[in-house]
């Protein structure tokens, strides 16, 4: 489910020239990465009660029931014992059965809404719950180191991982090992993905080692299927056609807090900024204006754009663009390849943000 977004108000002329993403090179300290592991602004106010199941999809109603019960079961003491456990104390017995739920479904069926609702419904202080994307989790390990990440997240009651995507065997081993340590420490897990845990590697890798890691990871979760159509296109008009360079530029100058960048230059800039900083790259922006949108030239660039699209969507930042429509960003080869789920998600999210930006252009 999604909340509607109102485009930022225009003034006759902005107080200054538009901002530029290409002029920003944010530095993000490690403690900010931990503190920001909460549901993104788009999902600040979502709850189970605000999720409206599709009457034709009973699995959506069932998901709310199961997750509500899961949240209620996380009340009380930490699974490894009341209060904080000393690391030199006797290791508690590992919990029996799955210590997590895995929300499996297609694009736009409300998985992130439900995951954020679980975070909000879990009876624990915010500092005892963590919420982040798979990429943000791996970035946290890179910033803190593996052992410190285990110590930090091991004191949590719940870890929610959105868009669980395993793109290479190294990340598979890293996250599988991390989650195993956290389960041993008594942390409950919840994750979303577009594919069942045992199918995550399908169409990407075929090595026995990779598949074995996937199977070990899947044992931590109880899969919960959520059927339905993409709500971003349910009963909504088609995405608006791109505007002209002149329209986009005028809107950027007339909108307080808007940025204005040439799309090819932005793609080049993203290569110089670590993806863990893409959220900070958009700090305080009210709209993104892009000129000359072109097909993404290669897969590395495409995957960076996917991360930026996720951060923009999380923050509900409208995107106004000229050039090609967003459904022509990725080549047929990309859309038929191993990362196709990420690319379709990015198209869906950028299309939603393009709708939100229509009001920036004056008739």
Image (tube, rainbow, N blue to C red):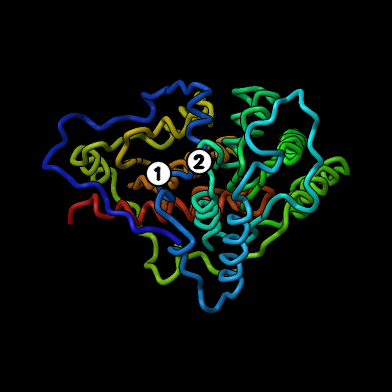
Q: Residue at x 29, y 30 (%)?
A: 19
Residue 120 % position (x, y): 49, 50
Task: Tally the marks.
Answer: 2
* Farthest residue, direction bottom: 56
Tag 1 residue: 315
Q: Residue at x 53, y 49 (%)?
A: 123
Asked if residue 148 is positioned above or below residue 305 in the image, the reply reads above
SS of the residue at dot 2?
loop
Asked if residue 272 is positioned above or below residue 323 in the image, the reply reads above
Residue 265 seen by the camera:
no
| Mark 2 Cα-neighbour bin, 10 Å: few <14, some 14–19, many ≥20 | few
The answer to which of 289 and 221 lies nearer the viewer is 221
Asked if residue 144 is positioned above or below residue 40 in the image, the reply reads above
Residue 154 % position (x, y): 66, 33
The answer to which of 118 and 358 lies nearer the viewer is 118
* Farthest residue, direction right: 208
Tag 2 residue: 125
Asked if residue 16 is positioned above or below residue 290 in the image, the reply reads above
Real-space Cα separation, disc 2 to disc 1, in angstroms:
23 Å
Residue 44 % position (x, y): 41, 48
Q: Is residue 333 left or right of residue 108?
A: right
Identify the mark nearer the N-term, 2 or 1: 2
Q: Are marks 2 and 1 in contact (CB under 8 Å)?
A: no
């Amino acid at each position: 489910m999604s909340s509607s977004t109102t485009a930022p108000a225009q003034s006759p002329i902005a107080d200054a020239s538009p901002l530029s993403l290409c002029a920003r090179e944010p530095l993000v300290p490690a403690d900010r990465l931990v503190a920001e592991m909460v549901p993104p602004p788009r999902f600040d106010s979502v709850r189970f009660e605000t999720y409206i199941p599709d009457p034709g999809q009973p699995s959506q109603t069932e998901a709310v029931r199961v997750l509500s019960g899961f949240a209620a079961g996380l009340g009380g003491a930490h699974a490894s014992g009341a209060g904080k456990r000393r690391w030199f104390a006797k290791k508690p017995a590992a919990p029996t059965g799955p210590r997590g739920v895995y929300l499996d479904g297609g694009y736009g069926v409300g998985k992130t809404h439900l995951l954020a609702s679980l975070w909000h419904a879990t009876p624990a202080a915010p500092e005892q719950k963590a919420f982040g994307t798979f990429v943000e989790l791996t970035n946290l390990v890179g910033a803190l180191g593996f052992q410190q990440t285990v110590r930090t997240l091991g004191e949590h009651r719940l870890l929610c991982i959105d868009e669980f995507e395993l793109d290479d065997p190294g990340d598979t081993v890293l996250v599988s090992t991390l989650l195993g340590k956290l389960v041993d420490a008594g942390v409950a897990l919840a994750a979303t993905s577009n594919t069942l845990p045992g199918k995550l590697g399908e169409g990407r890798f075929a090595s026995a080692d990779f598949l074995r890691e996937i199977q070990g990871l899947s044992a931590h979760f109880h899969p919960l299927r959520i059927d339905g159509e993409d709500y971003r296109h349910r009963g909504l008009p088609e995405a608006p056609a791109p505007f002209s360079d002149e329209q986009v530029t005028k809107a950027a100058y007339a909108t307080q807090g808007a940025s204005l960048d040439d799309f090819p230059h932005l793609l080049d800039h993203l290569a110089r900024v670590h993806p863990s900083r893409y959220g900070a790259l958009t700090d305080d922006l009210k709209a993104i204006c892009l000129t000359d949108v072109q097909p993404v030239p290669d897969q590395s660039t495409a995957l960076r754009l996917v991360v930026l699209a996720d951060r923009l969507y999380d923050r509900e930042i409208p995107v106004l663009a000229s050039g090609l429509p967003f459904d022509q960003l990725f080549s047929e080869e990309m859309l038929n390849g191993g990362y196709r789920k990420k690319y379709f998600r990015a198209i869906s999210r950028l299309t939603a943000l393009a709708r939100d930006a229509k009001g920036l252009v004056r008739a």
